Image (cartoon, coloured by chain):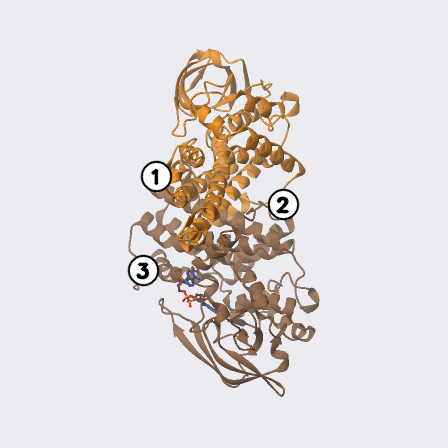
Chain colours: A brown, B orange
Amino acid sequence: MEDIRFTPGLLPPEAEALRAEVRDFIASHLKGYPGVKRAKSWSGADPEFSKAMGARGWIGMTWPKEYGGGGRSFLERYVVLEEMLAAGAPVSAHWVADRQSGPLLLKFGTEEQRRKYIPAITRGESYFCIGMSEPNSGSDLASIRTRAEKTADGWRINGQKIWTSKAHTAHHMIALVRTRPQDPKDRHAGLSQFLIDMKETKGVTIRPIRNMAGEQMFNEVFFEDAEVPADALVGTEGGGWGQVTTELAFERSGPERYLSSYQLLFELVREIGADAGPAEAAGIGRLAAHLSTLRQMSISIATMLERGETPNLAAAIVKELGVAYEQDMPGKAHDIAGISPRTGADAGGFDQVMAYMTMAARSFSLRGGTREIMRGIIARGLGLR
Amino acid sequence: MTGTSEMANILAEAAGRLLEDHVTRDVLSAAEDGTWPQDLWQELEQNGLTQPLAPEDRGGMGATFADAFVIAFAAGRRRAPVPLVETMAAGWLLGRAGIDVPPGPLALIDGGGDLALKDGALSGVAKSVPWAAQAGHLVVEIDGTVLLVPADAVTLTPDSNMAGEPRGTVTLEAAKPAATGSLGLTGNLPVARTLGALMRAAQMAGAMEGAVTLAVQHAGDREQFGRPIAKFQAIQQMLARAAARAAQARSAAETAFLALDRVGDDLTDAEWDVAAAKVVAGEAAEIVYDAAHQTHGAIGFTYEHELHFTTRRLWAWRGEFGAETYWAQEIGQRVLARGADTLWPDLTARQKG
Ligand SMILES: Cc1cc2nc3c(=O)[nH]c(=O)nc-3n(C[C@H](O)[C@H](O)[C@H](O)COP(=O)(O)OP(=O)(O)OC[C@H]3O[C@@H](n4cnc5c(N)ncnc54)[C@H](O)[C@@H]3O)c2cc1C
């Protein structure tokens, strides 16, 4: 049984100094930005906003300066992320690149790949999507079938990805594909990662999938004899599983795993108002208690990252807790406010945000690895499996 | 930023080992039948573990709350059947009020209830006071004044909580304190209540770690359908969820201890962290209580098995020094009074370095 411990930490002064700057930036860039849009949290996109963040040095903050990174600490980055999330800023255009694709390239990519791709990410001009899931491979990622075959001057990719968030706006995908046939003795062997240009590569077709909240956010992506150059391979051929595991650790460790529904809490507090009865106050208090303790745990993870650790188990725990919290929020809001949200033209901020969040929250315990998969990781940490 | 200090490691090691050695099943069940574990108390006291928080010149160790957390956590983890955390908290109050800390167990009385201080003497009734019958002195905090009251100055009607820990109704009739001092601390709530809730939150986190550990061990040992029940996914998922909640409770409690080190002369902000810790611990207790018992099956429902020494305490502590509803209302009212716009800024301001 691994010792599960989240050492409480306070953010250092340089991180706190940044907070005021970020708030000023948000106040001027998002003036009058409506609650329904803020409610999209890190699913809301605005390339201009991303570029403005890039100009401030707030993308790739922890990356080396030689590639355009900020050379700053994970705790400073944490402050920028949580302020953006609390404000419901439209950060999704660059989010994946900043969170996982950039770090992946820095860790496993070649020097040329770093020089070619990283600076544009830090400027907020280059967006990435994640090509992992396939129609027959969700939780069981190792069972993917999309394959890449070696050609004279590169690789030829055939197969299909699905649920690819923002594939329609991303410039690049980092795809996990099979470069060798499935080996029944080693399910994790023969997988590799490729960086695919989504705008230029022939044989790539993107088809949108409308989600239950009516948004066009994720997609199907088809590869039909899609030719990519030899240097599209990221890391080692056959080493894809180890790399993707690292990538998933980046994907799961951030504050977006408990702050996705912050906007609903904000609207709920406004809706309930100062003259609330004791039951309403207690309901709000419980949500506030979770908010503040989850924040502490999230800061603790940022501290682990800063120490160079890979906090897989800790990230799974915070994702399990955080997702439960953000996902339960609409139900709690329903209990506290006791109304069914309206969506028509006369709907107020609370109604609109509540209606949206009630639907959007269904995805929280799926994306980035399901609740059950997270609990499986924790169970392994406990020594149960 | 803070990590684990040298002092905390020493205290964790000392308290952990001592409690593990002394708090046996026999000691626990004898304590429930009314036998005071004198050896255990003596060992704790001789090792300085009962007064970590009082200053050295008042008879304590002068440690920080951050360091003392591990003692309270261990007290819960090992189910110490003595008023270790109450004595610790009372010692801090005495030290702050400039009163020398007497040896022996102390009881902590929340003066926010029916007590009244008149002409330097205390009158009223305090209910469900933990360990009142075992304490040589009672420490009362009332409106910023700390009073050290000798046990023989009060009348006591003993009872117990659902874990069989001694509690009692204390009646004071113009009881004269042995010493009185001013705390020099303002806040929104009675200070002893906040300290009590702080300690219970840490004990609960410890008890939850204990319950999860017992359940994980049992799941590995117990075989059904030809394999350890740990191999069943239903068991894995249930315990994973419980372990995550226990980890949250621990993190929240530790954060609250840290907040106590930053109070200066105003407890208001730290009250928030204590409230969050007590709420989160209470909610987690529900889940851990269920998962630990369900994993154990019928054997965990017996008096013979040790699980209930942990889980009954968990449940009892959940209601002491303010249940979740009480603390949730407190912070909920604060959030609502301040309004949505300050919710996030207030949170980040409170938890900064
Ligand atoms: C909004 C959203 C955005 C997404 N974005 C992307 C993206 O950008 N790129 C990408 O690659 N993918 C993306 N995904 C896909 C996501 O990673 C998958 O949905 C997820 O991994 C689960 O796969 P699945 O949907 O096929 O469900 P399945 O794996 O079929 O699972 C269905 C149910 O079975 C349970 N289950 C499966 N296996 C087990 C097991 N071993 N033990 C117990 N229970 C099990 C699951 O927990 C779940 O409850 C996104 C998904 C959503 C909802």
Q: SS of the residue at dot 1?
A: helix
Three-letter code for the amino acid on which mark 1 is drawn: Pro
Vertical relation: A61 (above or below) A11: below
Look at the numbered disc 1 and say if its residue's Cβ is closer than 8 Å to ligand 1: no
Q: Dot 2 falls on which chain?
A: B
Q: How far apart are marks 3 and 1 (CA)?
A: 27 Å
Mark 1 highlights which residue?
Answer: A278
Q: Name the residue under label 3.
A: A347
**Marks 2 and 1 on same chain:** no
Gap between marks 3 and 2 measured at Cα:
44 Å
Q: Is residue B135 above or below residue A254?
A: above
Q: Please identify the residue farthest to the right as the structure is shown.
A: A66
Residues B158 and B260: in front is: B158
Label 2 residue SS: loop
Of the two numbered discs 3 and 1 on the same chain, state the one appearing first in sequence.
1
Chain under disc 3:
A
Residue at 52% of width from left, 32% of height from top?
B75
Q: State the CA–CA distance, disc 2 to disc 1.
A: 36 Å
Mark 3, Cα crowd under 10 Å, few <14 / some 14-19 / many 20+, is few
Q: Disc 2 marks which residue?
A: B1
Image x and y of residue B150, in percent: 50, 14
Crowd class of label 1 (few under 14; some 14 to 19; many from 20; radius 10 Å): some
Q: Identify which residue, A49 or B48, lies in the foreground.
A: B48
